Amino acid sequence: MRINIRSKWEIEAIRRSCIIVKDVLNLLYELLQPGVKTKELDSKAEEYIMRSGGKPAFKGYKGFPATICVSINNELVHGIPDSRRVINEGDLVSIDVGVEMGGYYGDAAVTYAVGEVGDNIVKLMRAGQKSLMKAIENAKVGGCLYDISASIEEIAKSEGYSVAIEYTGHGIGTALHEPPSVPNYGVRGTGPKLKKGMVLAIEPMIIDGSNNLVVANDGWTVYTEDGSMCVHYEHTVAITEEGADILTDGIIWH
Ligand code: MG
């Protein structure tokens, strides 16, 4: 497994794409109200990315038909925006955005509750956020790749949740997905040594129930078979001597 090492200059190029990703997510947060259609969110995202000089990284990727992924309630990832799909009060909505600019990629995701939701949902969201931040703390020079993975799994399991097995984080840079895979489970002290200049998209996917997943008939939308609610948080981070540099930093969480 060859993991790319990025120069300072390249990391800044990746950061420029990541800043657009962050801005899109914060724009969509403002627009995420009951009654909005997921396709409207997609159109706004595409418009913003194009105006910023970037390109939607997901559109056309293995045939994915849209700019963003919008996954609602028991949908975990890869939901396709649709002009008939309406966001309702109480929905748990994950949005994933990828941008390419000048040949460099950024990728991030966040899960929002729309309006009032139960304490169980708030607890699930907090666990997702906490696991991502813990994972990022473990993305350090001298550590091992699966320290990141283990920290996600440990937090999820300690709070009674499961993690997705089939879907993982990834290296990112001059392609949307590069080696290595960054699983949401693993054994501390194993995996490739982490080095300065590695850039990773770390993305906990945490489920309040069984992690049996199904792909819908649309060929993309991944949902929990038993209907369990789930969250997805993702940052693109660069490993530096001073610790992980969160290139998509500044995304509104709530
Ligand atoms: Mg990703």
Image (tube, rainbow, N blue to C red):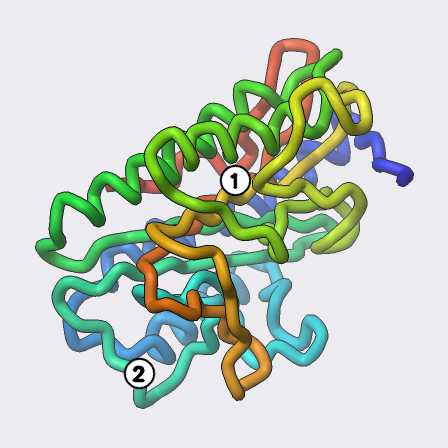
Residue 65 rendering spot, x and y as whole percentages: 57, 81
- Which residue lies at the image location 67% right of the left edge and 37% below the top edge? 200
Distance from label 2 to label 1 (Cα)? 26 Å
Question: Earlier along the polypeptide chain: callout 2 or callout 1?
Answer: 2
The quadrant in which the C terminus is found is: top left
182 left or right of 5?
A: left
The quadrant in which the N terminus is found is: top right
Mark linked to residue 235: 1
Residue 31 rendering spot, x and y as whole percentages: 24, 63
Q: Which residue is label 2 attached to?
A: 85
243 to 150, vertically: above or below: above
206 left or right of 176?
A: left
Return the residue nearer the eye: 160 or 89. Answer: 160
In the figure, residue 229 lies in which quadrant?
Answer: bottom left
User: 10 Å neighbourhood of mark 2: few (<14), some, or many (≥20)?
Assistant: some
Residue 204 rendering spot, x and y as whole percentages: 50, 43
Q: Is residue 22 visible?
A: no
253 to 47, vertically: above or below: above
- Which residue lies at the image location 42% right of the left edge and 36% below the top edge? 156
- Number of numbered discs visible in the structure rendering: 2
238 to 201, vertically: above or below: above
- Which residue lies at the image location 63% right of the left edge and 57% below the top edge? 166
In the figure, residue 89 lies in which quadrant?
Answer: bottom left
- Which residue lies at the image location 24% right of the left edge and 56% below the top edge? 30
